[in-house]
Image: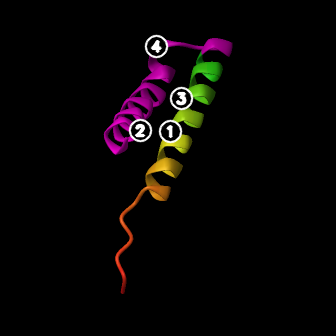
Amino acid sequence: MKSLLWAVLTIGLAVNASTSFVFDGLQQALISIVTGLLVLGSAAGLYVLRDKHSG
């Protein structure tokens, strides 16, 4: 599960960063919103699944 979340995070960041170079207008905004939500969701999932070390 963590591998999938890391893959989604990495791909989402790359796609989100490159949309401004490839697309413009409404299409670019929609793709950025969707990939941004995927990145936030995968980051939240990784945070929830992190290894908790007793301190």
- Give the CA distance from mark 4 to mark 2: 20 Å
Badge 3 density bin: few <14, some 14–19, many ≥20, Cα 10 Å? many
The mark total stands at 4
* Mark 2 or mark 3, earlier in chain: 2
Query: In the rendered image, which quarter contains the C terminus?
Result: bottom left
* Mark 4 or mark 2, earlier in chain: 2
Determine contact: label 2, label 3, CB under 8 Å. no
Provide the major secondary structure of the magenta segment.
helix
- Foreground mark, 4 or 1? 1
Determine contact: label 3, label 1, CB under 8 Å. yes
Q: Residue at x 41, y 33 (%)?
A: 8
Magenta residues? 1-27
Is 11 situated left or right of 26 in this image? left
Q: Residue at x 55, y 43 (%)?
A: 40
Badge 1 density bin: few <14, some 14–19, many ≥20, Cα 10 Å? many
Q: Of the residues shown, which amino acid type is indicated by label 2?
A: Leu
Residue 6 colored magenta? yes
The circle on residue 9 is: 2
The circle on residue 39 is: 1
List the residue tagged with mark 4: 22
- Give the CA distance from mark 4 to mark 1: 19 Å
Determine contact: label 4, label 3, CB under 8 Å. no
Q: Callout 4: helix, strand or loop?
A: helix
Badge 4 density bin: few <14, some 14–19, many ≥20, Cα 10 Å? few
* Mark 4 or mark 1, earlier in chain: 4
Q: Residue at x 43, y 56 (%)?
A: 49
Residue 50 colored magenta? no
List the residue tagged with mark 3: 35
- Give the CA distance from mark 4 to mark 3: 14 Å
Determine contact: label 1, label 2, CB under 8 Å. yes
Determine contact: label 4, label 1, CB under 8 Å. no
